[in-house]
Image (cartoon, rainbow, N blue to C red):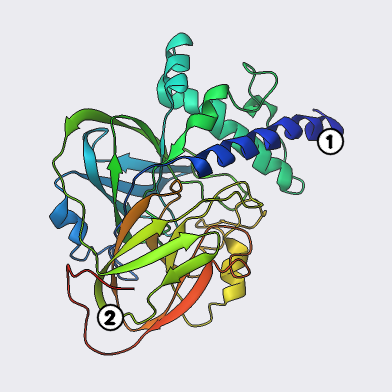
């Protein structure tokens, strides 16, 4: 067992590497999209979605728990390039999401060189080191030094990790609910994962909720969705039209910029239904993955601070996406997965009044 002093020495290059990685991704450009569907409390019931009508390229992702394993089941592991709808069906009682990241060529070459499967290679060099770092932040948790990388002595991550770019994906969705996200994917290899944590602080991806998706050079021919309203996310906060009626909506979400926050990631955006008793402070505290009790959702722990309805995962500066959702009258909030989102104007509460339902497929004006 290594001493705490040795552990701190090891973590210094880890933190430096993370800062470089997310500064790189914040300054890069990428294109993705997202829509969302609503569900009942007890059964998974998909509602009509603009995404399914506009995109023939559909991948279903089933999130489930099998014993100690948290897994994703993809309906396809190879798809044509273009606009693609990811339908995340949550068959568990935990909150999940499906973040999509482009795999750099360096990782592909490294897996070939080491004669390993690409997904196994990624887990060894990215997922496991992240879990080790998380474990150091949890009091009294035993550290697994087998999760430390051995190939690259001067860094937690190989050189190619800073070239992995965020491509959006379905946002947080509550247990026994479904959500849909449409993103534009170019030819390449992609990691699809959920890094929500279980009761002891293990990332769901570390527990096998991570898969590989191959996108070919064949074009799907799917078109970009229409939208009814817009949301703009930047370092200045979340801006949107607060006059939102009940009914189906497709929000165009634009990321004007990206910055690195204290948790070493950029901003994204998610929609929450603020159920009775849900507090802004509770939601904000839960959104920081680096906090020992942040992003914790499992059958034996907190399921999350509110009812998540989906959203748009992290994308690079200049990107935009589409989020589809059916809204009922009630209290809602847009929130970003960053530390203290309320103080950063990244947690915005709004109300949906009773009245005429929104029309479908209409372009909204800010």
Which is nearer the eye, 80 or 210? Answer: 80
Q: Where is residue 223 in the image (x, y as percent from the top left)?
A: 16, 49
Above or below 322: residue 190: above
Look at mark 2 in the image and give the residue it sits on: 246
**Which residue in the protein does label 1 denote?**
4
Q: Which residue is drawn at 66% across and 36% down?
A: 132
In the figure, is residue 187 to the left or right of 242? left
> Based on the displayed image, in which of its 4 quarters is residue 126 positioned?
top right
* Left or right of residue 137: residue 168: left
Q: Earlier in the sequence, mark 1 or mark 2?
A: 1
Up the image or down, 10 lies above or below 330; here it is above
- Label 1, label 2: how many angstroms apart (C-alpha)? 54 Å
Q: Where is residue 297 in the image (x, y as percent from the top left)?
A: 52, 57
Residue 52 can be seen in this image: yes
Assign the C terminus to one quadrant of the image: bottom left
Q: Is residue 121 above or below residue 341?
A: above
Residue sitting nearer the eye, 138 or 359: 359
Q: Quadrant of residue 142?
A: top right
User: Within 10 angstroms of label 2, few (less than 14), some, or many (20 or more) residues?
Assistant: some
- x%, y% of residue 233? 46, 61
Q: Residue at x 51, y 42 (%)?
A: 27
């Amino acid at each position: 067992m290594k001493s705490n002093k040795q552990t701190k020495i090891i973590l210094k290059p880890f933190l430096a590497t993370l800062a470089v990685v997310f500064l790189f991704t914040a300054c890069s450009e990428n294109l993705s999209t997202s829509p969302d569907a609503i569900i009942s409390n007890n059964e998974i019931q998909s509602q009509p979605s603009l995404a399914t009508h506009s995109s023939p390229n559909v991948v279903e992702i089933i999130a489930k728990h099998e014993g100690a394993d948290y897994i994703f089941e993809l309906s396809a592991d190879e798809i044509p390039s273009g606009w693609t709808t990811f339908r995340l069906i949550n068959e568990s009682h935990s909150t999940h999401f499906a973040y999509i990241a482009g795999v750099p060529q360096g990782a592909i070459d490294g897996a070939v060189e080491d004669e390993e499967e690409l997904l196994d290679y990624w887990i060894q060099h990215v997922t496991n080191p992240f879990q080790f770092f998380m474990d150091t932040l949890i009091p009294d948790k035993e550290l697994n030094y087998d999760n430390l990388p051995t190939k690259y002595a001067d860094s937690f991550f190989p050189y190619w990790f800073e070239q992995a770019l965020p491509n959006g994906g379905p946002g947080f969705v509550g247990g026994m609910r479904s959500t849909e996200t449409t993103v534009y994917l170019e030819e390449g290899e992609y990691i699809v994962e959920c890094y929500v944590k279980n009761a002891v602080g293990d990332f769901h991806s570390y527990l096998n909720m991570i898969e590989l998706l191959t996108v070919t050079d064949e074009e799907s021919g799917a078109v970009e969705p229409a939208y009814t309203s817009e949301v703009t996310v930047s370092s200045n906060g979340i801006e949107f039209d607060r006059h939102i009626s009940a009914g189906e909506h497709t929000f165009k979400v634009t990321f004007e910029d990206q910055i690195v926050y204290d948790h070493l990631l950029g901003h994204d955006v998610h929609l929450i239904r603020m159920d009775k008793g849900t507090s802004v402070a509770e939601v904000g505290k839960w959104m920081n993955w680096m906090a020992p009790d942040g992003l914790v959702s499992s059958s034996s722990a907190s399921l999350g601070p509110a009812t998540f309805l989906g959203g748009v995962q992290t994308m690079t500066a200049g990107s935009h996406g589409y989020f589809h959702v059916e809204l009922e009258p009630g209290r809602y909030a847009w929130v970003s997965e960053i530390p203290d989102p309320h103080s950063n104007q990244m947690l915005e509460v709004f109300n949906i009044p009773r009245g005429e339902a929104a029309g479908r497929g209409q372009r909204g004006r800010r």
